[in-house]
Amino acid sequence: MVTLSDVHQQFIGHLQGKSRASATILAYGKDIAQLVEYLKSLDKTEPTQVMTEDLQAFMDSLAKDSYTPKSVSRKTNSTKTFFKFLKSLSLISEDPATGLEHPKFENKPPRILTKLEYRALRDAARADIRMIAVIEMLLQTGIRIGELAKLRVEDVDFTNQTLHVPPFEDTRERIIPLNKAAGDSVAKYLGIRPKTPSHALFITKTGRPLLIRNIRTAIDRYFRLGDIKGAKVNDLRHTWVAYQLSSGVPMTMVSKLAGHKRLTTTERYLQFITGATSDAKVKLEEL
């Protein structure tokens, strides 16, 4: 007899095999573990025992426990993916999750920094050559924090003024133009970068690669010092996308350079941009 708990572990292995992002695998794993526990309380431990009503009752219980509609929607998505997996293994003939509907919720608009704010961030970090380079790379190229943490010294091409962004989990490999602000800040950092066998671009004082959590903690500190309210590291990426679109860079080009999987992801920024120019141009805007 195959139980839901057994298949839960297989499901995690399945996601890992498909090279899903580690954060996605962790979230899906926790969501399904929570679902399996709930179904166990209903004395339903086998895949064939589960009905749509059981899954809907689980979602309703989450809402009563003060989970936000966005969280319930994510757990709905996890549940649908899990039961598709069960069906692919022929453990169920009918998929009870097909009838589940996502709760309605509004996505928060992206936090786009004003010129005053990102200049204040620079000012707050001006004495920290390494973090100024980190901030400029995020702000001037729009790369993700995980992609930045994976950068190697050889990914920066000063001759051609480009940045090679290696694939990170399920993100796309790409080449991005490197403007003067980003190039100059990295060149200055490389002048004081500690000697180390590590090829990682950004490293600690002891020569170890700078981790995502280290980068996030440091930039959060400079947001506080700059008195920039409600801003997070990923908002530097939001700001890059918004400023490129508002300056007339074609959406398809911005989408490709940002590594968005869908053009609609880039398109959603348009509703938050005011005074966008209609003059199309190819050169990227320097922030």
Image (spheres, rainbow, N blue to C red):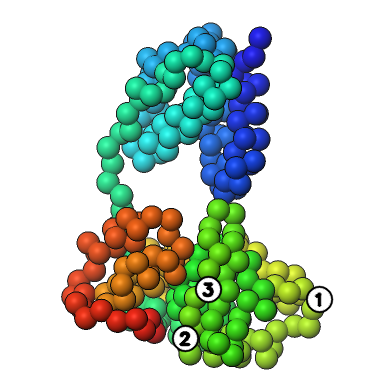
Circle 3: is it few (<14), some (14-19), or many (20+) Cα within 10 Å? some
Give how far across and how far down residue 105 sits, in percent.
28, 41
Q: Earlier in the sequence, mark 1 or mark 3?
A: 3
In the displayed structure image, the side of residue 119 where residue 48 appears, left or right:
right
> What type is the residue that disc 3 sits on?
Ile
Residue 47 visible in the snapshot: yes
Kindly report the distance in space between the C-alpha atoms of the residues bearing marks 2 and 1.
28 Å
Question: Which residue is rendered at x = 63% and y = 41% of the image?
Answer: 16
- Callout 2: helix, strand or loop? loop
Q: Do callouts 2 and 1 mark residues in contact (Cβ within 8 Å)?
A: no
> What type is the residue that disc 2 sits on?
Asn
> What type is the residue that disc 1 sits on?
Pro
- Callout 3: helix, strand or loop? strand
Question: Which residue is rendered at x = 34% and y = 22% of the image?
Answer: 99
Circle 2: is it few (<14), some (14-19), or many (20+) Cα within 10 Å? many
Figure check: 285 above or below 219: below
Give how far across and how far down residue 233 sits, in percent.
47, 66
Q: Nearer the viewer, residue 13 or 135?
A: 13
Query: Residue 175: which disc?
Result: 3
Which quarter of the figure has residue 11?
top right
Residue 225 visible in the snapshot: no
Q: Nearer the viewer, residue 128 or 256?
A: 256
Q: Nearer the viewer, residue 201 or 208?
A: 201
Residue under circle 1?
A: 197
The N terminus lies in which quarter of the figure? top right
Q: Nearer the viewer, mark 2 or mark 1?
A: 2
Give how far across and how far down residue 232 sits, in percent.
44, 64
- Callout 1: helix, strand or loop? loop
Query: Residue 179: which disc?
Result: 2
Figure check: 39 above or below 129: above
Figure check: 219 above or below 96: below
The C terminus lies in which quarter of the figure? bottom left
